[in-house]
Image (cartoon, grey):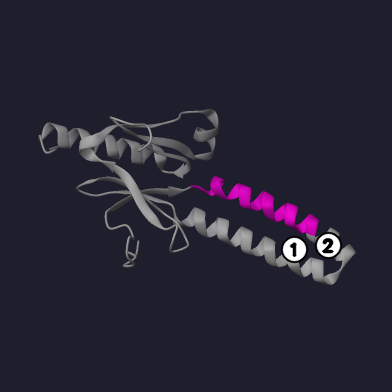
Amino acid sequence: MEQDNSPGAPRGVPLCHKSWTAYLGCLALAVIAVFVLRLAFNYSDLAAAAVLAVSTLAIGYRVLLIRSVQLYHDDVGVWLYSGVLPWSRGVRGVKWRDMDEATYTQSFRSWLLRSWTIRIGHRFTKDAEILLSNMARGRDAVALINQRHQQLIRDNRLG
């Protein structure tokens, strides 16, 4: 994977990203947009052009937003990078010393679609935890996070 050198871009070890199931909402929005576009053509060409422009921008933004989500870890903690627009782009996370545990939700749907809901808990507050749905390789990411966390605890490197 090529590393992004823009300010705030992930610099650690990538763990997982959004699964194909995250794009199902975009697909549903596109299907609805086609029907609305058909109705708009019955009204006027200008209305159809407006519907096409707005739906293209909305769907394009949602796809870019989904693609921007990346979970990674470094020596300091586990981090979530996301955002498309400069004022919404950023990183948030949980430091290793403050981490409680990483878990994933096991269900028939997640097993069948290989799309996991994961939670990286914070020991002191629920406000700082990371909760992500529709994550590809989420189960593997949780195992890696917990393994690294336990290794840091054993080596007494959390301080």
Where in the figure is residue 51, as x and y percent of width and height?
75, 63
- Relative depth, front residue between 21 and 48: 48
Predominant SS of the magenta segment: helix
- Residue 141, relative to residue 69: is it above or below? above
Side of 159 relative to 76 (left or right):
left
- Give the structural element (helix, strand or loop) at label 2: helix
Q: Residues within 10 Å of mark 1 (few under 14, many from 20)?
A: many
Q: Which mark is residue 51?
A: 1
Say whether residue 35 is left or right of residue 20: right
The residue under the point 62% across, 48% down is 25
In magenta stretch: residue 142: no
Nearest the viewer among 101 and 2 is: 101
Q: Amino acid at mark 1?
A: Val
- Which segment did they paint magenta? 19-36
Name above or below for residue 112 compared with residue 39.
Answer: above
Whether the residues at callouts 1 and 2 have beta carbons within 8 Å, the answer is: yes
**Residue beneath label 2, please?**
40
